[in-house]
Amino acid sequence: MKTKRLTYILLTASLLLYLSCTGGGRGTETLAEAEKLMNARPDSALTLLDSITAPEKMSARDYALYCLLITQARDKNYKEHTTDSVVRHAVEYFEKHNDPKHLMTAYYTMGRVNQDLRDAIKAQDYYLKALQAGETTDDYALLGRICSNLGMLYNYQEAYGEALTKFREAEKYFTKANETPALAYVMRDIGRSFNMLNLTDSSIHYYNKALSYSDSRSKPGILNELGSLYLTTGDTDKAMSLVKEAMSFDGNSDFTQIYLVMGKIFALSGQNDSARYYLIKATHSQQLETRASACLVIYQMAREERRWDEFALYNTQFEALHDSLERQTRSEIIQRMQSLYNYRQIEHKAELDKMRFQRNMYIMLLAVFLSLVTLISVFVFNSRRKKKKKLMEEQLFARINSRPVKNCREQINENKERIEHLRNQISENKANRHIYNMEIRMLETENARFISELKDAALKVKKFIVFRVYSCHCSI
């Protein structure tokens, strides 16, 4: 203990020296140092992070990392969370950037915070997101903790089969990470799940596996739970042996749980005085369940021994504790139902948004398709129209040119009659107006040419007459 205390003092002094040299612990270096210390010395990491003044003035990435690390450090130092707003900033930042490791940690921490806030469904959702984000990482220790927390949430929701699946996944990850202490807890949790399913033999098997991985911190609790399990089978000797071993450990463990089991063993063995001694100690527990169980056994013994004063005292205490537990259970059930309702509302909204998005996509694709069809149709129609127009022009031109050659004046008159007829046709048949107009233009052009030719011919005749008159005069 003295060595540990000395180590802690030296480490704290080193941290203070570091802070004084870095201007109050600001900057990327402080965050990097806190991140290194997070798992081994979370208290020192918290000290470093608390030394940072005005963290919001950091760069966007550093501030997001600060929000993540400060929430992590508080969680690891067992400080109760009251809001998820700080770590949410980290989640939102890392969601937008390609950083799977920090995104997984942010999702996991968000799950831890919501678990503290008793929002099991929301916590479960973030743990599942953390698993998905961590698919490409090799942080097996964190993946194991995510699976372990999911397993506990499934147990809380009485989904014991799903819980066992996640605990076994956690076992796989902890084995890869060589996390022996964590393996002890996950084996214990598997044992608890089997006990919930009334599979006592399987439960005992996994509690024994948990003992093989346990250390001085986890062993007392595992021994006590295994002793309690043997007590339910009626094997008081085995239960007594395990609980006595649990009591032999020094430390900061909550011994009231051990006192409760020891008291129950003595009560079942008929040693009421020894039972009463340990059960009265158990009534000082901070946990309502432990106190209620201790009061129940004491008042049952008092009723059998006709110790009515003691019976009345502990019966009253038990009733009060039982009522408190019922209110707490009802509150938790209501909170769980509200959380589930909120989650389903979110899921429903997400589903509606998805359907709306799909509908809009269908409408957009249909609009694009119809636009393409329209454009193609217009293109084909115009192409055919142009071809038809060209063909009709060629046919008209050939027809006009194929007429028998006539006197220019006759042709002009005939053309004028045709033009007049076509103009009458335009008013009656507007559909072919374009063709009629085109033929009129061609006929008018032809008439202009004929008129020009007639004028040229008249001029030549006139010149010839003048020339002849002049020639005759000269000869006289």
Image (cartoon, rainbow, N blue to C red):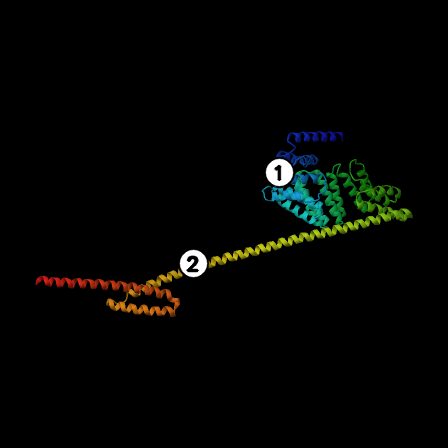
Task: Please name the residue that numbered disc 1 is placed on.
Answer: 57
For residue 68, the mark is: none
- Tell me residue 393's x, y (percent): 34, 63
Q: Farthest left residue?
A: 476
Determine which residue is flagged by label 2.
379
Number of dots carrying numbers: 2
From the viewer's side, name the closer residue of 292 and 28. 28
Of 236 and 304, nearer the camera is 304
Measuring from the top left, give residue 475's x and y in whole percent.
8, 62
Quarter in which the N terminus is drawn: top right
Q: How far apart are marks 1 and 2 (CA)?
A: 61 Å
Three-letter amino acid code at the position of disc 2? Phe
Q: Is residue 351 visible?
A: yes
Near mark 1 (Cα within 10 A), the count class, few <14, some 14-19 or many ≥20, is: few
Q: Which residue is pictured at 77% across the width and 41% down the height?
A: 221
Residue 101 appears left or right of 226: left
| Quarter-of-image position of residue 37 | top right
Q: Please indicate, yes or no, whether residue 135 appears anywhere in the rendered image.
A: no
In front: 468, or 127? 468
Quadrant in which residue 460 is drawn: bottom left
For residue 132, above or below residue 217: below
Does 60 sit left or right of 386 as displayed?
Answer: right
